[in-house]
Image (cartoon, helix red, strand yellow):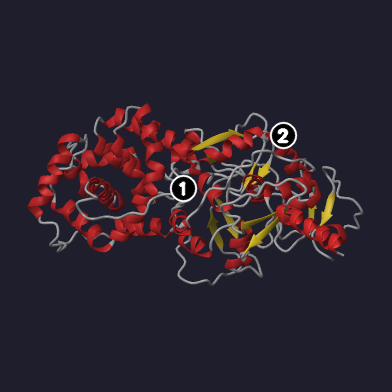
């Protein structure tokens, strides 16, 4: 009996030795274990109860075992909120448009003190920052009404500014131009204006194309921080070459060189921005003062007791990997532990959270450095995992197509704003803003201007004069490259299952020239 008890005690001790108790926080920990070790979770968080250690996910899904898996970076949820919040863009644009330039009372900044500080800035920058009552009004307005917003922008700038400075220096452009991105986009890489200007530097579709910023169903390179910054630097360098003055280069960046040259003529030949200002469009008239006010606030942030939060990730602690196979953000999160929200922040140009692989195109994934090394070390296993998962889930991915920046959508019977917004991956408020709508009411036949984010092949469906390809037609003629999925997306309310049923199809294969019914009758 004593011998039996001793044996049970020994077994219990051995089992205990093979147990590990770990804190159940999958945001910051990745558990690596041998096959005979049992991991127990202490106080598991219900939010993450369904998440497995990465080693287990990989092993079960692709039958491989990765070594030296990285620890996921700790992410402060408040910081992520700052990174992903887009309301600052609307606030910044509204403040420029609606600025009344009336005298603002702000006793903490006497006019004499402001004059002295502006004189110091003027002496060390190529911009004309001499004291002006209009500039004083904008600066005090920001201090009085938008201090918290500026603190949030200062927090974001700690990530973006090192990259901006690197690119601007390459083109011998004043580093203070980095503040222009705050005025343009409030440092939101996915910002889109009411006329379709997009990204940190607010490129229009055609201007972006001029600087090799491509837009496809998967990618909008105007939202790529590095590529768009380089394009902006090239464009600003060319504007300065034309005007020989940075204030005028800024004004022409906003309204176009043509408007600035007209203002020069109307002013009698003056090239001083403050003399030209009243001859410029209203938005541009507020644009340069907004830039100079932002420059002042950032340069004198300590004097005004700004206290921005500290970032959990900085640009120089990230690195890029050129992808060799299609990957989506969910897969990358599973194998690296980097949260999807962080992937979206670091890689904003991928509109569908998918990094495509296209021949002759180079698409890169940006990751925190500690995850980059482990990704490269286990690259083959990660691609195998991604491919196997795609096969298992039988996901049908959108076709890669170059897209138009803007489409004209004709309202059909049964349409409503929410339905149209979902179809094109945009917000209801965006559609209303683009079309100057004050209510949600639509009428059949009404045309809407839309800047789509979802992969819609608009060229064939919106420009074709063939009635058989019109969304109201009952018959559709199959074209080369079509699939049931791509056809269904052209016609609201039509699904792949509908097309199969209405056309008595037992297969998904199509041939160019085939006629498909688009309704039950």
Query: Does residue 268 appear anywhere in the picture?
Result: no
Query: Does residue 325 appear anywhere in the picture?
Result: yes
Q: Is residue 419 above or below residue 490?
A: below
Mark 2, residue position: 380
Say which element carries label 2: helix
- Please state which of residues 172 and 269 is positioned toward the viewer in this rendering: 172
Q: Position of residue 23 (x, y in %)?
A: 60, 58
| Dot in front, 2 or 1 | 2
Q: Is residue 462 above or below residue 364?
A: below
Mark 1, residue position: 189
Q: Position of residue 12 (x, y in %)?
A: 77, 59
Q: Quadrant of the C terminus?
A: bottom right
- Please state which of residues 451 and 460 is positioned toward the viewer in this rendering: 451
Q: Residue at x 70, y 44 (%)?
A: 399
Q: Is residue 189 above or below residue 360?
A: below
Q: Position of residue 396 (x, y in %)?
A: 76, 50
Among all residues in the image, which is located at the extreme front? 2
Tell me how far mark 2 sits from mark 1, CA to CA: 31 Å
Q: Is residue 47 left or right of residue 62?
A: left
Q: Is residue 118 left or right of residue 482?
A: left
Q: Quadrant of the N terminus?
A: bottom right
């Amino acid at each position: 009996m004593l011998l039996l008890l001793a044996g049970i005690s020994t077994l219990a001790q051995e089992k205990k030795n093979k147990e590990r108790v770990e804190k159940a926080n999958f945001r910051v920990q990745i558990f690596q274990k041998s096959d005979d070790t049992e991991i127990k979770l202490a106080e598991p968080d219900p939010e993450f109860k369904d998440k497995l250690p990465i080693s287990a996910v990989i092993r079960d899904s692709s039958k491989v075992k990765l070594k030296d898996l990285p620890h996921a970076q700790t992410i402060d949820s408040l910081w992520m909120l700052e990174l992903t919040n887009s309301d600052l863009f609307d606030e910044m644009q509204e403040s420029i448009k609606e600025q009344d330039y009336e005298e603002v009372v702000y006793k903490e900044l006497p006019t004499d003190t402001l004059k002295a500080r502006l004189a110091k800035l003027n002496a060390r920058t190529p911009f004309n920052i001499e004291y002006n009552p209009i500039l004083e009004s904008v600066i005090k307005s920001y201090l009085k009404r938008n201090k918290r917003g500026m603190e949030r922008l200062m927090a974001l700038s700690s990530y973006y500014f090192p990259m901006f400075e690197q690119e601007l220096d390459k083109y011998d452009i004043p580093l203070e131009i980095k503040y222009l991105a705050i005025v343009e986009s409030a440092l939101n890489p996915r910002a889109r204006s009411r006329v379709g200007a997009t990204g940190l530097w607010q490129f229009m579709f055609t201007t972006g194309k001029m600087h090799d910023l491509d837009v496809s169903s998967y990618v909008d390179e105007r939202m790529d921080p590095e590529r768009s910054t380089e394009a902006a630097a090239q464009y600003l360098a060319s504007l300065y070459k034309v005007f020989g003055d940075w204030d005028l280069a800024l004004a022409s960046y906003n309204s176009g060189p043509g408007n600035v040259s007209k203002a020069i003529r109307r002013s009698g030949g003056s090239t001083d921005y403050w003399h030209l200002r009243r001859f410029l469009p209203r938005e541009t008239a507020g644009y340069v003062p907004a830039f100079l006010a932002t420059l002042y606030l950032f340069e004198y942030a300590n004097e005004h007791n700004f206290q921005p939060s500290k970032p959990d990730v900085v640009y120089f602690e990230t690195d890029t990997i050129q992808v060799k196979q299609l990957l989506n953000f969910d897969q990358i999160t599973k194998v690296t532990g980097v949260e999807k929200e962080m992937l979206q922040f670091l890689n904003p140009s991928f509109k569908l959270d998918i990094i495509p692989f296209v021949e002759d195109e180079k698409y890169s994934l940006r990751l925190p450095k500690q995850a980059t090394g482990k990704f490269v070390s286990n690259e083959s296993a990660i691609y195998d995992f991604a491919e196997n998962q795609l096969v298992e889930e039988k996901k049908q991915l959108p076709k890669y197509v170059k897209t138009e920046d803007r489409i004209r959508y004709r309202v059909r019977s049964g349409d409503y704003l929410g339905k149209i917004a979902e179809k094109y991956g945009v917000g209801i408020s965006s559609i209303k803003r683009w079309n100057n709508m004050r209510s949600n009411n639509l009428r059949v036949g009404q045309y809407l201007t839309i800047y789509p984010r979802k992969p819609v092949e608009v060229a064939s469906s919106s420009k074709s004069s063939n009635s058989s390809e019109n969304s109201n037609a009952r018959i559709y003629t199959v074209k080369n490259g079509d699939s049931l999925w791509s056809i269904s997306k052209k016609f609201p309310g039509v699904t792949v299952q509908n097309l199969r049923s209405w056309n008595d199809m037992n297969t998904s294969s199509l041939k160019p020239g085939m006629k498909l019914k688009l309704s039950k009758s």
